[in-house]
């Protein structure tokens, strides 16, 4: 089983098994991240970076991660938790909370819960030695949805570069149309609220790239696509969705 | 130098009347009037021309309905003038890259707009709304921003007794209280945006407002911009990293109160 799965997927299942066996989470020798679609049973929490802070250098510096992961992401988690404390959303996943906040129009809670989700998701979308063309199921479905990887890459880059402000570029599965779509969101926006299923994201808030690239967002976007995209994670997300059907 | 404030006023859609000598479809007259004003407002380089001439010369020099090309205004001080509050590196990137990109993209969008207007392609005209708002707003906002900053310790950075100080007492119980509120609002902006001190011509009082992204204050709220604080991350990340509150607190030392008061008097005077 393990040989046919990505390490992150194996880690997710180990994590889920550990939770079921009531082991303290920090007793696990995993990469520290909860897999996608797995309810870690701990509500919204500050998921560890899936790699060492310097692992993505020279593309993203450890300094950037110290702020992006250690401060920005941590703050969203803390504020979201303080907002759900004592409510019936306490202990629920960031996905559940953001969807609930969206339903109820609670902008503040949505911003923080969605940003907690978005950042955890984003950090997992990268890996050392990543990027370039995908393999596996996602490669086929990209071909089917966009015609070619090149077209997908063009659309994704354009979305990332043209977000009018702080935002995100997304590759998602549209479960109704049964194909992949590229979208962009502003602020804390997340495609889950449109019924789409996220597979890949790129953070284009300036804090994601300003330390390393200053104003050069297009440069950052290209580096992400060519050197960082964790297609294993994208495939795992796709597998999880297909398995759910 | 033409006061940007006076001219941004014309961007608020009032009654749509045919411009003298300009026959356009009714639906685009207001747009043309507004765009011509936008163009004139943004061309602060035309400070060498007398006030009235600057506006008409700009329109004359260009055959395009939207008034032709905008240019990046010079800073009123050196790139290092606002240190240690805002570094020379930040000012250089902020002005020559970010603001310059808004100008470039505004010009590109206006070219597309001209083509769409000339061919009567309403669909294309409408599709440009986002780019115009973003880049036009970006250009307007930054042009106002550079002018409401001054070196720390300079005479302009002191709030003197006078009409503005009195108005701050009337609207906020004083400058300190206003700063406290404006700081809180500016820090609380989610994502990219601006904090503003504005003049409400209806109530004749000062108000604090925030705008998301590059939405310009006056065209979208009717408030006349007196003082803007850019809270996009690019405004402070080099110098303050994620600590936006430190930046906002520090920026009060480099506010050009003379310009803020001038804008206030001009807004009130109308």
Image (cartoon, rainbow, N blue to C red):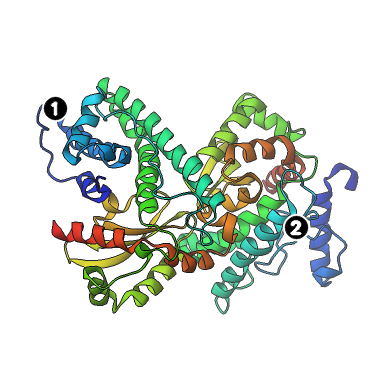
Give the vertical position of A84 relative to A57 (above or below): below
Coordinates of residue A21 in the picture (x, y in percent): 84, 70
Q: How many marks do you count on the picture?
A: 2
Q: CA distance from mark 2 to mark 1?
A: 61 Å
Instruction: Say which element carries label 1.
Output: loop
Which chain letter matches label 2? Answer: A
The residue sitting at 51% across, 64% down in the picture is B247
The residue sitting at 21% across, 36% down in the picture is B55
Q: Nearer the viewer, residue B222 or B78?
A: B78
The residue identified by callout 1 is: B22
Q: Describe residue A222's horizontal placement relative to residue B175 as left or right.
A: right
Which numbered dot is residue B57? none
Viewer-nearest of discs 2 and 1 = 1
Dividing the picture into quadrants, the one containing residue B131 is top left
Q: Describe residue A100's horizontal placement relative to residue B66 as left or right.
A: right
Neighbourhood count class around disc 2 (C-alpha, 10 Å): few under 14, some 14–19, many 20 upward: some
Q: Describe residue B14's horizontal placement relative to residue B140 as left or right.
A: left
Which chain letter matches label 1? Answer: B
Dividing the picture into quadrants, the one containing residue B170 is bottom left
Residue B179 visible somewhere in the drawing: yes
Q: Nearer the viewer, residue B180 or B87?
A: B87
Coordinates of residue A124 in the picture (x, y in percent): 72, 51
Give the vertical position of B46 relative to B153 (above or below): above
Residue B124 visible somewhere in the drawing: no
Q: Describe residue B130's horizontal placement relative to residue B260 as left or right.
A: right
**Mark 2 vs mark 1: same chain?**
no
Neighbourhood count class around disc 1 (C-alpha, 10 Å): few under 14, some 14–19, many 20 upward: few
The residue sitting at 62% across, 48% down in the picture is A209
The residue identified by callout 2 is: A49
Coordinates of residue A107 in the picture (x, y in percent): 46, 63
Coordinates of residue A137 in the picture (x, y in percent): 74, 34
């Amino acid at each position: 089983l393990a040989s046919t799965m990505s390490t992150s997927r194996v880690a997710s299942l180990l994590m889920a098994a550990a939770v079921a066996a009531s082991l303290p989470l920090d007793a696990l020798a995993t990469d520290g991240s909860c897999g996608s679609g797995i309810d870690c049973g701990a509500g919204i929490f500050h998921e560890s970076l899936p790699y060492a802070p310097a692992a993505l250098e020279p593309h993203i510096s450890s300094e950037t991660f110290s702020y992006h992961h250690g401060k920005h992401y941590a703050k969203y988690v803390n504020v979201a938790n303080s907002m759900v404390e004592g409510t019936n959303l306490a202990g629920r996943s960031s996905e559940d909370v953001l969807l609930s906040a969206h339903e109820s129009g609670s902008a503040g809670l949505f911003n923080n819960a969605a940003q907690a989700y978005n950042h955890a998701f984003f950090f997992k979308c990268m890996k050392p030695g990543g990027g370039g063309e995908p393999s596996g199921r996602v490669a086929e479905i990209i071909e089917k949805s966009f015609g070619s990887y090149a077209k997908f890459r063009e659309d994704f880059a354009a979305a990332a570069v043209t977000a009018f402000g702080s935002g995100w570029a997304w590759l998602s599965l549209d479960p109704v149309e049964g194909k992949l779509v590229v979208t962009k969101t502003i602020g804390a926006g997340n495609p889950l609220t449109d019924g789409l299923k996220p597979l890949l994201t790129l953070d284009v808030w300036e804090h994601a790239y300003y330390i390393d690239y200053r104003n050069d967002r297009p440069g950052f976007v290209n580096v992400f696509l060519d050197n960082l995209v964790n297609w294993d994670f994208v495939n795992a997300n796709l597998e999880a969705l297909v398995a759910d059907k | 130098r033409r006061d940007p404030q006076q001219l941004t006023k014309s961007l608020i859609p009032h009654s749509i009347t045919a411009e003298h000598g300009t026959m356009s479809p009714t639906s685009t007259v207001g747009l043309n009037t507004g765009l011509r004003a936008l163009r004139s407002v943004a061309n602060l380089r035309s400070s060498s021309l007398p006030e009235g001439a600057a506006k008409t010369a700009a329109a004359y020099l260009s055959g395009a309905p939207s008034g032709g090309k905008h240019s990046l205004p010079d800073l009123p001080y050196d790139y290092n003038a606002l240190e240690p509050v805002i570094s020379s590196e930040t000012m250089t990137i902020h002005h020559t890259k970010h603001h310059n990109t808004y100008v470039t993209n505004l010009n590109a969008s206006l070219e597309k707009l001209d083509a769409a207007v000339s061919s009567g392609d309403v669909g294309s005209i409408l599709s440009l709304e986002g780019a115009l708002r973003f880049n036009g707003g970006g250009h307007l906002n930054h042009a106002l921003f550079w002018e409401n900053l001054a070196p720390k310790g300079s005479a302009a950075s002191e709030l003197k007794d006078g009409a503005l100080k009195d108005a701050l007492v009337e609207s906020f119980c004083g400058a300190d209280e206003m700063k406290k509120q404006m700081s809180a609002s500016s820090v609380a902006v989610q994502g990219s945006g601006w904090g503003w001190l504005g003049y409400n011509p209806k109530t004749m009082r000062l108000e604090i407002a925030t705008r998301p992204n590059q939405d310009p204050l006056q065209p979208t709220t009717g408030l006349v911009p007196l003082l803007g604080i850019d809270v996009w991350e690019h405004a402070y990340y080099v110098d303050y990293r994620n600590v936006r509150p430190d930046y906002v607190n520090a920026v009060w030392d480099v506010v050009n109160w003379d310009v803020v008061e001038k804008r206030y008097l001009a807004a009130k005077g109308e």
